Each structure stands twice: as C-alpha cells, then as structure tokens.
Image (tube, rainbow, N blue to C red):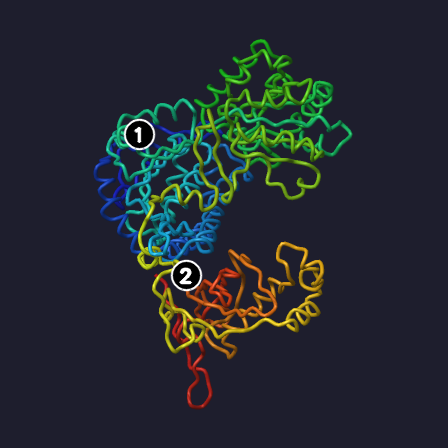
Amino acid sequence: MSAMPVLQSLIADRWVGTRPGGVLSSAIDGSAIHHVHAEELDFGEALVHARRTGVPALMAMDFQQRAARLKALAAYMNERKESLYAISRHTGATRGDSWVDIEGGTGTLYAYASMGGNELPSGNVVHEGPAVQIGKKGHFAGTHILVPRGGVAVHINAFNFPVWGLLEKFAPAFLAGMPCIAKPATATSYLTEAAVRMMFESGLLPPGSLQLVIGSTGDLLDRLDGQDVVTFTGSADTALKLRGNANLLAKSIPFNAEADSLNAAILGPDVTPDDEEFDLFVKEMVREMTMKAGQKCTAIRRAIVPRKHLDALAAKLRERLARVSVGDPAVEGVKMGALASKAQQKDVGERVAALAHGNEIVFGRDSGFAPVGVGAGSGSFFSPTLLLCRDPMNNDVVHDIEAFGPVSTLMPYSDFDEALALAARGRGSLVATLVTHDPKVAAQAIPQMAAWHGRLLVLDREAAAESTGHGSPLPMLKHGGPGRAGGGEELGGIRAVKHYLQRAAVQGSPTMLTAITGEYVRGAVLNEGDLHPFRKHFEELAIGDSLLTHRRTVGEADIVAFGGISGDFFYMHFDEIAAKESAFGQRIAHGYFVLSAAAGLFVSPAPGPVLANYGLDTLRFVKPVAIGDTIRARLTCKRKIDRQKKDAQGRGQGVVAWDVEVTNQAGEVVASYDILTLVAKHGAERATDPDGKTPSEPREAHS
C-alpha cells in the first residue's frame, strides 16, 4: 500500500476510494504527490442520490435562500483559502495564477449570490413577463415562466482552472436548484478534491447537491435523462466526442460546450509605436502568454498587427519576454510557472513544432530558457514562445493548430479588412481584443467581429486603468463563443442560471396567471379592503392587494406651479399657440407632474411598514393629460421578494413591487409603472417594556 494519499470521489454524500490507482505528479519537480483511486464508481447510485435526495433538498429552498447559501459558502472558503494556495503550487501556478483560480472561484460564488438576491424572486418560479393579452376582453392571456428542471447537471471540467472551473459552473446550477456531478480533469483533480472537501465539511451544501468524480465518467452520460444537463470545458475534439454521445442525442439532453479557441488580438491601424496603445498591446500579449503559463482557453493565440509596425512590435515583445523569470513559483521573482503535467509539456512541444514549420520563431527555448528552482529540470516548464507568420492569409496552420501553453503567433496585415478577415479565420473564438484609440475603428470592426467571437474587449488608454484584461471571463458577462469555441454560453449573469431552468409558455385568465407566477397580471381579481396596502407589513401583504384612489382634476395652476418648481418650461406645457399647432392640439401637463400627483393620491403619509421607495420600473406615459382632465390611480401589490435581510437596526424587511395605473375620466390609462419599496416585516418595530427599555433580543440562529 502506497504512503501517498489516494484521491477520493464524493458519491451519495460519502467519500469513495481507498485503493491506489494512477499516479499524479507535481508540475514543479515531477515528484509523485497523489494516487487516483482504483475503484470503479456506481453512477447509477450517484444519479439516484442526486434525483431523490439532491433535488428535494434544493427545492426545499427558494432562489433567495440558495443565493444566501452561496454567499455563506464563499465566505467559508475564503477563510480557508491558504490551504488551497499551498496545493495549487503543484499545478505549476504562481500566486497570481492561483488567485485567479481560487479567489476568482469564490468571487464567482459571491457574484451569483448577489445577482440571485437582486434579480430572482422568492419561490422557485421565474416570471418572464410581461403577460400578453390574447382575448379581446382581457379574460385570456399568456406569458412565460422558468422553473427548475428537476434533473442533474453533469459538469466536465478542464485541468487549467481546478477551482474556478468547478465553481463557475456550480454557482448558477445550484442557484437554479439543480444538483451537480462534477468531473475535473484528472491531472489537477487533487486541487478540485481539496476544494470539494472544504465545501462538504462546511455543512452548507444541502444533501446530494454536489458530487465529485475522480477519474473516468464511465457510463454516466449513457444514464442521463431528458431533464438533465451536461456542460463541458476543454478541447474542441473532446467536445465533439461527448456531444455525439448516442444517449445525449436520442434524449435531446442539453449540452453546453466551452472549447479552446484561437483567440485573436488586433492592433488597430491608427496605433503607432509612439502611442500608449502600442505598449498596452505588448503588455496584454505578454500577460496572456505567461499567466497560467498560457494555459487558458481565452489566451491570445494570434496577434494581428499592421505590417509596417511588425518589426517594432516583435522587438518590444522579445524584450519583455526575455525579462520573464520562469520556474518554481516558490522562488522569489518568478513570474511564470509550469504547464500542468509532463503530458501537457509534450503536447505543447509537438504543436509548436507543427506551427514552426514554414514560420519563424521570434522568441523561444533557444532564447536562454532556464527555469529556476530545485528540481525544475524534472518539472513541466515550457519557454514562452513567439512565432511569426509573414503570410497569414495563405497559411492554414496558424489558424488551425493551437498550442495550449505560452505560445502565440504574430501575423501582419496590410489593410484593416484583411485584419478582420484574419480574425475570422479562427472559425469561432471565445474572445478577441481590439487595441485602438479611434472610435471609428471600433465602430467599424466590432459588429463584424461579433459574428465570430463570444466576447470582445476594446482596449485603449482610457479603459486600461480598469480593464480586467483580454483573458478574464467575468460572472456577469457571457463566456463562450460560436463555431470551434463550442457554440455554448457559460456565465453571463442570470442568463447562466436560466440555462439550468426550463421555459414554458402558460395561457389562462389573468387571475390564474397571477396565481401561477406569483406576480400580479393586470385583469386579475383584486383584493380591496378597508386597510390601505401601505399600512400592511411584508408578511400581511398578498399579491393583488389593491387600492383605487380618489380623483383629482388637473388645473392650469398645477402646470404653472410644477414648471416653477421643476424648471421645466417646455412649450407643450406653457405655449398656447405652439401647443395648438402640435399633434396634441392643446397644452398638456408634465408627465412627471402626473407621476407626482398619482403619488399624492395613493401615498399613506404617516409612518408605517413602508420604509423607502427606491425606484421605478417600466414607466410609460401612455396618453397626454390636458387641463381639465381628472385622474385617479390604482395601486396593486405586484410582487414580493423576501431577501431575508435586516437593516442596521436589526429590522427585517422585504422588497415589494407595486403596479400603478393612472387613468383619466374616460378610464383610459395615461401612465403605467412599477414602484419598488422596502417594507418592514411584522414586529420589526422595536418593542419596549413598561419602563421604556428595549428588551434583549434572541440571537439569530444559524444552521
């Protein structure tokens, strides 16, 4: 029995694997550090557990509660991150590389916790409104809803980001109420296993919500069903193989691929060696070649530059690359680590040889490459390598072969149309960067480039101070691309959550749609009582609680007074002659006066549960209000979201959206909008004992 630790899979909430199998080595010195387990896994058991235990456990929570759980999980992992950093070194990562992976991963958890809390409802139904009236009399309508699929998400990840790769897929799936089975690439699975152990030990994962596969996926894909989802990150060749699985095809199981691609960076025709943008291009190139030793699906593989500046750019890149210290990340001053494994080192070497055929090597192993550190000679280091293809329009190799390491190819263009054509030769990429300081150049290029790229960065001196860089996918923006980049989409804010939800069209009466969506649909039955809705606490409010206000006739004095207060003396409100010649034929009231007057009609002025109004949505001024028109408002509780938050004084509160319709004397809608308010929960007002002292409050319980 080997003394080296055996990595284990997490199946059905228990750790599986004791018999040593294959050996995993440190990328730094080649020393053996782990065994994978030799036991075969029962994927039938894993799926049954996910469906019978994981789905109910997640569905016992709502979107808001799952968002809060993600936030707690991120905090827990951040408190223990140094243990992950120590392990990450063996993947060849520098501290900076590991920061992108580890804290980039927990940052993604935080981001989805925030987006879920701000954008998703209480409950487990998302209403994709507005509802559409179908019947002429308003008794029949239709809308769309999104609901959890009730299946399992299988995540197959690449070796280059063992933590972020896990968490960027887990976060939106968890938020969507879908249990995950994660399969990391074996080469760096020891870091993923450590992260999953940490998550499991936190006690924050509902039972069955996350399982981990170390090693092969076996017959897992063959056992999936129509409610399941598969996501993959890795090579285009592997994506094609997985996508073609007979069971996935037969059952139309969604398959999302994010594949490596030949991403491009274009130096704009307006940029000269004397411009700041020239140096920005060089810095971006070097960073993308050396961060994670170039092992990023988003790294710049093709640098497309004006032919007249080719020599100057090549010289600057050589100078910068020569200053990059490569070796053991533990050695002070090292800026670039190793590739993830000897197998990766071999693969990159073979691909560089293929790329070099018929092209020039501007900088590479022969440029004094000597990685530093004890045992570095046995590690998986690879020299930063810059190639030059002088005739890229007639060289297919540089547009077909990707060396997944610190490798990029310079290629010149004669005119800008040729530059855009070269970028498109990648046949679909995750990201491209355009470095320019001319808005006209950006306006010309980006619409054309968008057809071939999933994300586009326009970099100039203004953006540079805050730019996150070419190769950094962000939780709120799409990560993915067309064509050889896989055709899928990851991240992208709430769009990523919706990937794990099922969309359905629903038809029925407004009352039925209100009940189903948890959101008031106009025309539904209203709840009108003696108590003003603004006098009700959050728990007491029901969707459809409504108030029809008294009336107010708009006079000329209202318009004059509002103009004086606001400073708005637009001719339609004050110029009798010009107003008569307009489409309205008369003077009309300010739209914002109508808004203000409506508030005066429905607001309950005394202190009460409504704590604050923090915005308006969907505001439309539908019809003009003339002098002499009489208006009234209907206020209806449209939507409630319990974010389970308290203010600084410990008062519980929720978010309530109110539907407002302002009508005239003919019953015609003149203004329509939603008001967003914070509403106190019952008992939020601090009670006092007979002596006037505030009694002690129980400490909030935590699971």
Amino acid at the residue labelled 2? Arg
Percent position (x, y) of residue 259?
Answer: 45, 28
Question: At numbered mark 2, what does the secondary structure look like: helix, strand or loop?
Answer: strand
Question: Label 2 neighbourhood size at 10 Å, few (<14), some (14-19), many (20+)?
Answer: many
Residue 511 lies, with reference to residue 145, above or below; the image says below
**Coordinates of residue 139 in the picture (x, y in percent):** 33, 56
In this orientation, which residue lies closer to the viewer: 209 or 350?
Answer: 209
The quarter of the rendered structure image containing the C terminus is: bottom left
Residue at horizontal 39 percent and vertical 36 percent from the top: 190
Q: Quadrant of the N terminus?
A: top left
Task: Name which residue type carries label 1.
Answer: Ser
Residue 113 visible to the viewer: yes
Circle 1 SS class: loop
**Given this view, does label 1 or label 2 mark the residue nearer the observer?**
2
Residue 319, by quadrant, is: top right
Indicate the position of residue 140 as horizontal and vertical percent values: 33, 53
Query: From what the image shows, is residue 296 above or below residue 136?
Result: above
The residue to which callout 1 is attached is 216
Q: Residue furthest top?
A: 358
**Quarter location, residue 679:** bottom left
Vertical placement of residue 168 versus 325, above or below = below
Q: How many angstroms separate mark 1 from mark 2 (CA)?
A: 46 Å
The percent position of residue 51, horizontal first and vertical second, equals 25, 44
Q: Which residue is mark 2?
A: 639
| Res 1 visible | no
Residue situated in front as seen by the camera: 291 or 229: 229
Specify which label sits upstream in the sequence, 1 or 2.
Answer: 1
Task: Name the one closer to the observer, 518 or 298.
Answer: 518
Badge 1 local density, few (<14 within 10 Å), some, or many (20+)?
few
- Residue at 26 percent across and 39 percent down: it is 16
